[in-house]
Image: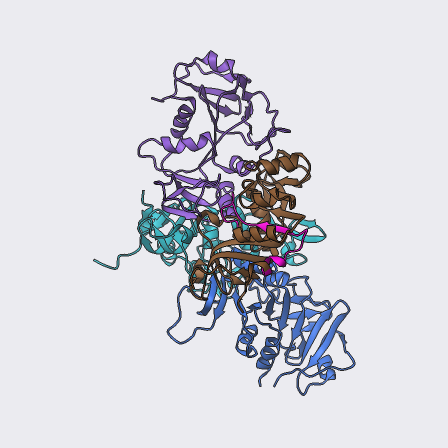
Chain colours: A cyan, B brown, C purple, D blue
Amino acid sequence: MSKVRKLEEAVAMIPDGAVLMIGGFMGVGTPPHLIDELLRQGKRDLTVIANDTARPTVGIGRLVSAKVVRKVIASHIGTNSETQRQMIAGETVVELVPQGTLAERVRAGGFGLGGVLTPTGVGTVVEDGKQRIELDGKVYLLETALKADVALIAAKRADYLGNLEYALTARNFNPLMAMAAELVIAEAEDIVPVGVIPPDSVVTPNVLVDCLVAKERRHG
Amino acid sequence: MSKVRKLEEAVAMIPDGAVLMIGGFMGVGTPPHLIDELLRQGKRDLTVIANDTARPTVGIGRLVSAKVVRKVIASHIGTNSETQRQMIAGETVVELVPQGTLAERVRAGGFGLGGVLTPTGVGTVVEDGKQRIELDGKVYLLETALKADVALIAAKRADYLGNLEYALTARNFNPLMAMAAELVIAEAEDIVPVGVIPPDSVVTPNVLVDCLVAKERRHG
Amino acid sequence: MDEKTLIAKRVALELQAGNLVNLGIGLPTMVAAHLPAGVNVFFQSENGIVGMAPVPEAGAENEDLSDAGGSPIGAVPGAASFDSAMSFGLIRGGHLDVTVLGGLQVDEEGRLANWMVPGKMVPGMGGAMDLVSGAKRVIVAMQHSAKGTPKIVKRCELPLTSVRRVDLIVTELAVIEPTDKGLVLKEVAPGVSVADVQALTGAELIVPATVPTMPIA
Amino acid sequence: MDEKTLIAKRVALELQAGNLVNLGIGLPTMVAAHLPAGVNVFFQSENGIVGMAPVPEAGAENEDLSDAGGSPIGAVPGAASFDSAMSFGLIRGGHLDVTVLGGLQVDEEGRLANWMVPGKMVPGMGGAMDLVSGAKRVIVAMQHSAKGTPKIVKRCELPLTSVRRVDLIVTELAVIEPTDKGLVLKEVAPGVSVADVQALTGAELIVPATVPTMPIA
């Protein structure tokens, strides 16, 4: 049962208005062909949960520039002047979350936890509207789980079952997001036969991946 | 700055009465020489946080059989009749924690989280004395972080800086515990030059490991 | 066919190709050997692997590869190993399709008790509470009674494993589905009557007009 | 020596061999180039690596290896890469020895504001809140004033990054240590007087009997 699908078929499964988690950190580890195809198919009203919106012409920033994003949940938008402009103009809703808290909230969603207690943000504007919980004299914020309809994942290498490996800092949010969405679509630079990736090197087990985007042929 | 120490020097750093986290699952992934040396040095009054106590003659079970353990926090003791006997006789305190909750509590300790919200245990005896928190109509228990004085870690391979790799199911609690203790002592089957373990294969980064136990020489 | 094999064969029919499945120690472990032809599933062992398999032959054991009982296992091509937090992330996060567990008691509300007999047996819950709370489908595979005492009861006297209603109970006598209306008798074993089942059941069964026989040869 | 180099050199003296260090974007990044001889530290980049290094030479970039700003970096032998949850586990869990961050304001209580100017600049906090809450030592490296307006103030008007008291402030004029009694002037820059520092500081400084000059050549 190969999970490989054509790029256009994979992206066709994403409805307008979907809540997407998209891997990557300043574009590194963001699946480029999935972004291309989202734009080509004219998907719209998207909610994007991601670390950042990169730059206006890079990665997730391209979705923002195309005005197909209704809401962004991210840890910073400082490198994307267009996201900032849309936020200030009221065109796009931006919810800012501390980066470590964002990572834990996504993880909690995928791991079946309701949330976590973190010291980050206590006494700052991040605290607004959240439960404060004191344990042994230390104060924490209760940060709740995040889930998504679809996760768009960039991997270095996959096998045909969907086991995924990542490379260096391109890993970032990808393995966390691959746990936290109903539909998981992964784009890998390379797809190898089952058994080529050793069990200890698999970061995302195949059972989490629903759909693997075929890579373009280089030979023949 | 090699972190390699002689076995006896490493274990000499552990005081009587210490709270230990010990990796392993039914003995698989439990550091054998560290257990030997704890017994040889006659350490006592230990608190052990671990998945289980294996069998009376295996892994952590050997500490229990030697009666040097005052308290056990574990997910099961069903395979060790001696732990059960000591518990029923009131010789050893045993605190039972669901396995997934134990993993998250240890992780929370190492990750600087106060705790997590889990659905596991709601409506059972595990709930006793714990905060119930309802989010979006679903009930969770607040499970708090665990930390230890010392973590005893078994790795497959280390480099001389202390980067650790694990093998197959011998990984289990080891990488979580390596985050959650003041002093981290690791025993590896093999120690290789720095740079031999690729960055993506390192599971426990060297900065977490304080002390690496020298392996016995096979050659020369 | 002995009773345990019957139970294992019937449970195996519940598994679907591609499922991620966790089998408890004891009787549930036998299910792996009775998968219908063509149904490939992935077995998880909660100590940290997806893709566990029997050891292929004597001498092919590995010290670092074991099941949750500590016994040597094998691994299928495409297996993945990970730490205990990830393993229970798969379980608690709803990524595990089916868990098959043994039982001491199941009650009218479909609640399972399988980890403790106060004063007698204190093994600890291990992964059971997470498995029952988190798996998409929970199947209890157990003998119908213990020396004549029903294990399916009105209300569990033993400490619960979870308040979550299990999805199916498979015994050597019957297949029973806990529902919000009560325990529905879905199938009887070959040569067993509805009356036989009710006689060894400590709770009221809802009995449909026709109760088919388990499709086990 | 320009002001930023002076700050970077002085901050570098705070780092000890074996430290795990996270440097913020901008001025703090310059610290890496000024480590004293023999002091080897590990640099973390919060996007997921311990052991980051400059790109060794043109052409040795890798698309999958970048710093938190998305620029290419290198990696030392013995580097380790991991996901974002682990990266912030290192930060929040107290495993990060030192973080060096830029600042917009620091107040009398040693509280830092460095992520937002309401109505003007809304970049988001990125990893700053976790870094300031979680690192064992927080060093603020910034210019002493912004166009003549003091950045060290009685009380931050800008939104706080954390309520945690930072450990040290290093500017081109002075080294200041926030304590529970207030801001202590520890050192002045070469050629700068205590009065010069106080004149550009918006909060009261505690001035010891002798204030040494920064040990920067």
Q: Residue B101 vs residue B191: left or right?
A: right
Could you tell me residue C22's position as x and y percent? 45, 37
Could you tell me residue D216's position as x and y percent? 62, 83
Residue C131 located within the stretch drawn in magenta: no
Could you tell me residue C189's position as x and y percent? 41, 18
Q: Residue D36 vs residue D61: left or right?
A: right
- From this view, report whether residue D25 is shown above or below residue A87: below
Asked whether residue A133 appears in the rendered view, the answer is yes
Residue B16 located within the stretch drawn in magenta: yes
Q: Residue furthest left?
A: A220
**Magenta region:** B9-30
Foreground of the two, A30 or D60: D60
Q: Residue A174 vs residue B87: left or right?
A: left
- From this view, report whether residue B160 is shown above or below residue A23: below
Q: Residue furthest bottom?
A: D191
- From this view, report whether residue C59 is shown above or below residue D96: above
Number of labelled discs? 0
- From this view, report whether residue C196 is shown above or below residue A33: above
Quadrant including the C terminus of chain C? top left
Could you tell me residue C97's position as x and y percent? 44, 37
Quadrant including the N terminus of chain C? top left
Asked whether residue A27 appears in the rendered view, the answer is no
Predominant SS along the magenta part: loop
Q: Residue furthest front?
A: B220
Q: Residue at x 71, y 50 (%)?
A: A136
Residue B124 found in image quarter: top right
